[in-house]
Image (tube, rainbow, N blue to C red):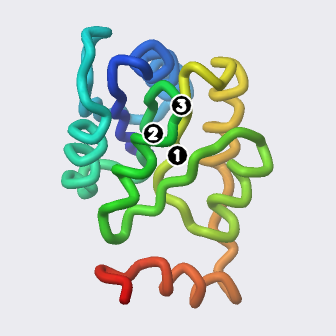
Amino acid sequence: MRIGFASDHAGYVLKERLKAWAVASGHGVVDFGTDGTPSVDYADYAHKAAERMNEWDRLVVVCGSGLGISMAANRHAHLRCALVTSPEHARLARQHNDANAIAFGQRLTDPLQAEYYLKIFLETPFEGGRHENRVKKIDVTLCQ
């Protein structure tokens, strides 16, 4: 699987750790930045990764809390980013919501737990069935 990664300065360390875990697990990696800890805006990196969706199968975004970068990512049609704080979130994000992106908050998530949540996220298939119609209702370009 090809996994895209993006973060701001406050998520850089966790992003790098999760990238290393992904490579060690046999996944391809695409890094959309940032590439250090000097202050940058999370939205710039979320948008950069979202605009290049053809380069990844799943996306991992990280900022200090996970909130801002997940909100920015979710501004893009057909990108369903789940802020994950538990194994159950990771499983249900894929199983019921067909999430194609996962967000973490570096300041709020233990790195070992983040690796575990990412593993669950990547290994869980979308259940389909009754959930397909619900997911289609998420994928609208403009809500009224």
The type of residue carrying mark 3 is Ser
Q: Toward the viewer: 87 or 43?
A: 43
Q: Secondary structure at mark 1?
A: strand
Answer yes or no: do the residues labelled 2 and 3 have beta carbons within 8 Å?
no
- Where in the figure is residue 75, as x and y percent of width and height? 33, 61
Q: Residues within 10 Å of mark 2 (few under 14, many from 20)?
A: many
Q: Quadrant of residue 43?
A: top left
Q: Is residue 134 above or below residue 82?
A: below
- Callouts 1 and 2 close, C-beta under 8 Å: yes
Instruction: Place residue 105 in its image quadrant.
Output: top right
Q: Residues within 10 Å of mark 1 (few under 14, many from 20)?
A: many
Residue denoted by label 3:
65
**CA distance for labels 1 and 2:** 5 Å
**Discs 2/3, front:** 3
Q: Residue at x 47, y 51 (%)?
A: 101
Disc marking residue 113: none
User: Residue 60 bears which disc, if any?
Assistant: 2
Give the label, 1 or 3, closer to the camera. Answer: 3
For the residue pair 132 and 139, the one nearer the viewer reads as: 139
Q: Is residue 49 above or below residue 128?
A: above
- Could you tell me which quadrant the C terminus lies in? bottom left
Tag 1: amino acid: Ile
Q: CA distance from mark 2 to mark 3?
A: 14 Å
Which mark is first along the chain, 2 or 1?
Answer: 2
Residue topped by disc 1: 102
The image shows residue 90, relative to residue 33, as above or below, that is below
Q: Nearer the viewer, residue 107 or 130?
A: 107
Residue 69 place in picture, x, y as percent: 40, 41
